Amino acid sequence: MNKYIKPERKIWSELVKRPVLQREKLTELIIDIFNEVQKNGDKALIEFNKKFDKTELKNINISDEEMQNAEKQISNELKKAILDAKENITKFHASQIPEIQKIETTKGVVCWRENRAIERIGIYIPGGTAPLFSTVLMLAVPAQLAGCKEIILCTPPDKNGNINAAILYTAKLCGVTKIFKTGGAQAVAAMTLGTESIPNVYKIFGPGNQYVVAAKEFAQKYNVAIDMPAGPSEVLVIADEQAIPEFCAADLLSQAEHGSDSQVVFISTDEKVFSQTIEETEKQLKKLPRNEMAKKSLENSHFILLRTIDEALEFSNLYAPEHLILAIKDYEKYIPKIQNAGSVFLGNYSCESAGDYASGTNHTLPTNGFAKNYSGVSLDSFVKKITFQNISEQGIKNLGKTIEIMAEAESLSAHKNAVSVRLNNIK
Amino acid sequence: MNKYIKPERKIWSELVKRPVLQREKLTELIIDIFNEVQKNGDKALIEFNKKFDKTELKNINISDEEMQNAEKQISNELKKAILDAKENITKFHASQIPEIQKIETTKGVVCWRENRAIERIGIYIPGGTAPLFSTVLMLAVPAQLAGCKEIILCTPPDKNGNINAAILYTAKLCGVTKIFKTGGAQAVAAMTLGTESIPNVYKIFGPGNQYVVAAKEFAQKYNVAIDMPAGPSEVLVIADEQAIPEFCAADLLSQAEHGSDSQVVFISTDEKVFSQTIEETEKQLKKLPRNEMAKKSLENSHFILLRTIDEALEFSNLYAPEHLILAIKDYEKYIPKIQNAGSVFLGNYSCESAGDYASGTNHTLPTNGFAKNYSGVSLDSFVKKITFQNISEQGIKNLGKTIEIMAEAESLSAHKNAVSVRLNNIK
């Protein structure tokens, strides 16, 4: 835990720095995996299952029986929670479907945009101890709303060759068309190149370890798009005198438990809230069942006392956090000053967990300072916006001269001629 | 010119292939250029001017005098054309500014998105014989509308150390904040890393040769975003019996004149229009003042006779053209069937030149099949969409249990606790 009391502005640029990730060395390994998948397809994936997931599978598909069992294994309580979350996520992402707006820019010249779904998309869901069915919701719900024809999901099997039941249940619920038991860089390679079982896709979404991240980056060389560049998850909490230290501490810890490289930043303008939040964080940490990760992550965290909320927001904009919590009064007033952030949580009752699971916003957000130049995942991430134009005889008469003059000035005479032949024809 | 009469479907996958670009070998050169710019800043750029642009400059800035002279050098006719185009581009892109739409997903849980401009963006404009002031319009107009604080433009000087007057005039008109005389990979490196004169930016836009394309790709390693991956420009024209061969030929040639690697595809369902368009293309080609490029590009072009418009659109969706012209009757009816395209031109009077210059749509579009997974440049390209949520006491009471159950099922107890502390506090 690093404490800074009213730090001078000249050290801010140090405080907003993220840990540098070493990724260069992975490239050769990733190339090998892509080559292996390209050469041997499904067979390569089964070999990788043996090597990395310590399980021997005959094939990478999910049987009908497995799907049915999954549904039975989940409690009704969890099913209801998933359904409630799905409803909220659907409501919010459905509101992002735009109405077609036809604009007559010049009399007789009508322009507009229409959404078209990306036809085939791939979702990667990591394995491990935390079965991220919430990420299935966050990616499959907007994919289905957008109208993606094929929604492929890859996730690694456990040692017994199984996939977590909640992941299977949620995938089916949200219209995932095919699920495969394969993980890591090889899953990304398979969705990029296609195998006998797995169709190649046009865009790959989802979180993962450094191998998955490197593989997604590499996939772009094969003209596949990805959701966004990745980095460790982060939260920045700004708290004034009316903030509740118990809540702030809980929010910081919920970020810290994601992993030892999670970034946690706490800023307060109030000395009492500042010191009480530190105390509360230490107190709550002890009560967490598995607190090793949170403990490590907190070691690198920053607790900063600043003078004003304006100053705090200035720092936040420089940091560009994935999650920004404004535990302040009059938060409405400060919204226009937020420049760089992935998702913002307003007031004492808007905890990050709400956005992580069920409020309706997407939890796939820009990390690592990417909130300066990237948006989080939304319905837009699953569509292309195609522009259309319809120019009438009158329209080209009105606009033709302008185009001719500009084309000529750019020395593009065939561009000019495409207008001239039309104008001549009308005369 | 390659002619195909009702080709079998099994060869379509060959016909939609783009020429493979060799880019691997450039990496070392690009790394050297980035290192040189990082080490020597402006001085490196001046050296590169000497080496690549054959001009000796004292500095890379534009003087006030140069800006004033630029305005004098441009005819009033061209000024008016640029202003008219700007007005249309502004109208269309302003219509893309969304209204904030607050969605109550659960009683007491309100979610919405707000646009925030990317603070600093960079525009690259190539030099050479065609001064692309139209691309300045296409990139600076939406950047200014979005509210980008710094709009940096880099473009290479000519042998006399000058920048084309129309580029300077348009840049000033559209709110470009700083213009620099530097081109090629080194300009991209400068906008990525920053120099004494050039601020580093968060996103780089604009076309360029293979060095610029490779440098933009490389810039992403420094967390800079780019507009989209690049490839040679393309048009696909679909014409039925009512199409006018003279217009179709002019459209094909306007694409072909872009460069010898331009892609031109013509599909007709009518034998007469098919053969007449081929004749017209050859006839018009001869009349073009500088037809070498167009001639070369046409050598690789495809003229395809198909049976139906549905079949033509199926081919087009597989090809995913940057520009798609529907010179057919009843084009309205076929719009829903268009799945993959950058920009679509409807009817006999909607020529590609209109969208290239002045109708209002953006001409920075996905090429090389990227229309399957990328949109063209729009206002969205210059903003991040930040999600907000405001959860009241009642809201967390309504949603809390759902979050707790999901967090527990993902074994994330601190996520659960962030809700529990709030629910306990309310009781």
Image (tube, coloured by chain):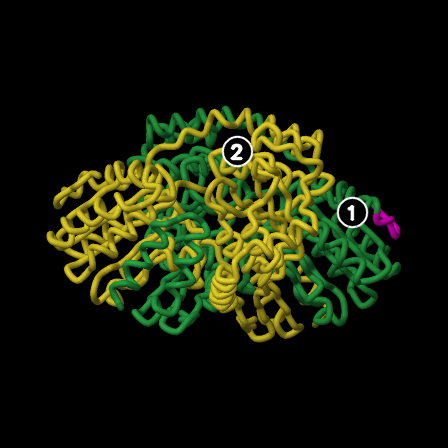
Chain colours: A yellow, B green
User: Residue sitting at 59 percent across and 27 percent down?
Assistant: A51
User: Residue sitting at 74 percent across and 49 percent down?
Assistant: B285
Q: Nearer the viewer, residue B275 or A100?
A: A100
Determine the chain carrying the residue at label 1. B
- Is residue A96 in view? no
Looking at the rendered image, the quarter that the C terminus of chain B falls into is bottom left
Q: Is residue B267 left or right of residue B343?
A: right
Q: How many marks?
A: 2
Residue linked to disc 1: B302
Q: Nearer the viewer, residue A237 or A109?
A: A237
In which image quadrant can residue A296 be found?
top left
Q: From the top left corner, tell me how far across and down residue A255 is, in percent.
A: 34, 47
Answer whether residue B5 is magenta in the image.
yes
Q: Nearer the viewer, residue B70 or B200?
A: B200
User: Residue sitting at 71 percent across and 56 percent down?
Assistant: B250
Q: Residues within 10 Å of mark 1 (few under 14, many from 20)?
A: some
Which residues make up the magenta segment?
B3-9
Q: Nearer the viewer, residue B423 or B375?
A: B423
Amino acid beneath label 2: Tyr
Of labels 2 and 1, earlier in sequence is: 2
